[in-house]
Amino acid sequence: NDDASKVRTLRRHARTYTTEKMPSSSSTFSFDGTNKVVVVTGGNRGIGAGIVHAFTTPSTSNAHDDDANRHNNRPVKRCYVVARSVEDDDVEDERVRASRVIHVKCDLSTAEGAEKVKRVVERVDGDHGVDVLVHNSGTSWGSDLETHSDDGFRKTYELNVVGTFRLTRALLGALTRASTPEDPSRVIIIGSIAGISPQTYPTFSYDASKAALHHLAKKLADEFAMKRKLNITVNVVAPGYVPTKMSNQLSKYGDSSDDIVRNGVPMRRAGTPADVAGAVAFFASTASSWVTGVVLPVDGGFLAKL
C-alpha cells in the first residue's frame, strides 16, 4: 500500500544520507593540534590558564580509540601565552623557538603591546601564521554611579575592547596565512553573559565593554567573511559565574560564591576554566568551521531562567 511504500522510500533515503553524505565523526568533530599555532591572551591564570592547558596537554586516549580518533588528542605545536604578569621568553634562543609554550610579556591596552605580540609571532612562526587567536585578557571596574570615574571606563575599554581590536588587526596577516577554506583560522573572544544581561552589581564599564565585544565580534565576522572573503571565523564564548581572581571581587557587594550559585545558576554549581575551555575547543575544532558571528553562553543555565 501507499503507506508501506512511503516508509520504504524514507528508509532508503535515510540509508543513502547516512552512508554517502555524512563524513565520519572522527574526522569531522575534532581538534588536531598538530602543526597548529595558538595565541592566548591573559593565559597565565584563571580561565586563560585553563584554555592554555586544554591546547597544550594531550588528552588521555582510550585503549579502544582507533587511529583516526587519536589525532583528536594531540596538543598544539605552539601556544603563545600573552600577559602583563609573565616574563618574556627569549625567542632568539633556538631552544625557546622549538618549545611548545612561549611567554610574551606586554600590556595589550597599548598599541605597543599588540605590535610586540606580532613581532614575536612573526619571528618564530612567520612562515606558518596563527591558526587560533583567543582573546581572554580583560579587566573590570566596579563603582557606584556617582563615583564611577572616567578613568575606570577608559581603562576597561582600552583593554577589553580596543586591545582586542588592535591585536586582531595586528595578527590579521598571520591568521590569513594559516587559514584554508576547509579549516579557517579562528578568532575566539571571551565575552561574558554580563554583555547579554547586565549584572545587578555596579559594574557599569565592564558590562558595557563586554556588550561592545560581542558586537565587535559580529562586525569582524562580517568584515572577514563577507567583505574581504577571508577564511577566518570570529566567535564569542560568554561565560557565566566562574570563580576567578576577577569574579571574587563581587564578594564585596555581599554575595558569596555559594549565594551566587544558589540564586543564579540552575545547574547548581559554579563554572570552571575547563567548562569555558571546552567551548573554546569547539570553536577551534573542525566542528565549527562553518560557524561565525556567534555568541555562545556557557553559564549553567543562568540566562535560561524563567
Image (spheres, helix red, strand yellow):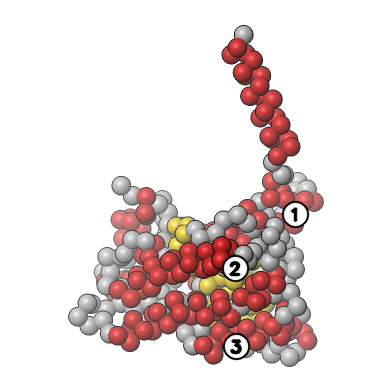
Nearest the viewer among 299 and 4 is: 4
In the picture provided, is 13 more to the left or to the right than 243? right
Residue at 62%, 19% in the rendered image: 7
Q: Is residue 22 above or below residue 261?
A: above
Query: Which-is-in-front pick, marks 2 and 1?
Result: 2
Determine the CA span between mark 2 and mark 3: 25 Å
Residue at 60%, 88% in the rendered image: 116
Q: Are marks 1 and 3 in contact (CB under 8 Å)?
A: no
In the rendered image, the residue lying farthest to the right is 67
In the picture provided, is 256 more to the left or to the right than 138? left
* Residue indicated by mark 2: 228
Determine the CA span between mark 1 and mark 3: 36 Å
Q: Earlier in the sequence, mark 2 or mark 3?
A: 3
Q: Is residue 71 above or below residue 232?
A: above
In the rendered image, the residue lying farthest to the front is 227
Few, some or many residues within 10 Å of mark 2 (<14, 14–19, 20+): few
In the picture provided, is 299 more to the left or to the right than 200? right
Q: Amino acid at mark 1?
A: Arg
In the rendered image, the residue lying farthest to the left is 146
Q: Position of residue 78 (x, y in %)?
A: 70, 74
* Residue indicated by mark 1: 70
